[in-house]
Amino acid sequence: MTPADQSRRAAEICRLAPVIPVLVIEDAAHARPLAEALVRGGLPALEVTLRTPAALDVIRAMAGVPGGVVGAGTLLTPADVRAARAAGAKFGVSPGATDRLVAACEDEGLPLLPGAATATEVMVLLEKGYSVQKFFPAEASGGAAALKAIGAPLAQVSFCPTGGISLKNARDYLALPNVVCVGGSWVAPKDAMVRGDWAAITALAAEAAALR
């Protein structure tokens, strides 16, 4: 899969909803009901971060949920890419981008949202063919104002900003012409998962899905 193909597919996934839930899940038993709750609320694209021992099992479980498109976040190494792909991930998200990581995603045919935080990083990825990128860490890197400024000279790049985004500031990003969606964890609070309050998560997802 070429970078251009990857970016086209990443853009399609990003356009499914205004918010991609960024999920850190400790218990694989939560995977299926959580995915069902988020999809029911209107958020089909799901990013499972590879930050817990359960993450790959979570991806496997979520891959079978009708209407869902599960991806793997926090991709750091080629081994992460291969494991995520084997578990059923349909897209990948990385905090930054290295040549080895990018090559592994291309080899595995895994659409990638590579992370960038500066104009130089954005330009390097654009030069490789990536026209859809993750702006991370969004708030710490200057927020919507910084992304708006980057968009002026680099209008051909679209972004999924992630990091510090909540219901409170999501609209600031979504109003920008170079933003296709945002990534956020607020739609799947840990306490609701522990309680098994899937209805509350569906309500949060519906609220997020209505942002645009």
Image: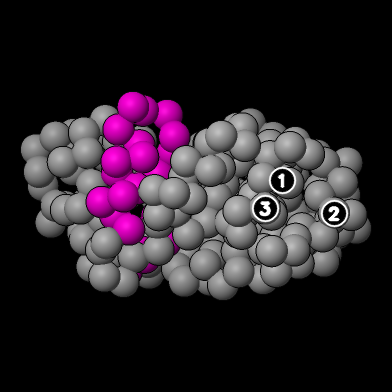
Instruction: Count residues near mark 3 (Cα–Cα under 10 Å), then give few for <14, some for 14-19, many for 20+.
Output: some
Crowd tier of the residue under label 1, counting other residues whose Cα lies within 10 Å: few below 14, some 14–19, many 20 or above: many
Q: What kind of element bears circle 3?
A: helix
Give x and y (percent) for residue 160.
Answer: 60, 55
Q: Which disc is residue 102 wearing?
A: 1
Residue 34: x %, y % from top left? 22, 51
Q: What's the magenta region?
A: 41-63
Image marks 1 and 2: residues in contact by CB distance under 8 Å: yes
Which residue position holds label 3? Answer: 107
Q: Is residue 139 above or below residue 151?
A: above
74 and 110: which one is in front? 110
Residue 172 position, x and y percent, is 58, 55
Q: Residue at x 20, y 53 (%)?
A: 32
Mark 1 to mark 2: distance in Å?
9 Å
> Which badge, 3 or 1, comes first in the chain's sequence?
1
Amino acid type of the residue tagged 3 in the rendering: Asp
Q: Is residue 207 above or below residue 190?
A: below
| Residue in the picture at 44% in, 49% down | 86
The Cα atoms of the two marked residues, 2 and 3, are separated by 15 Å
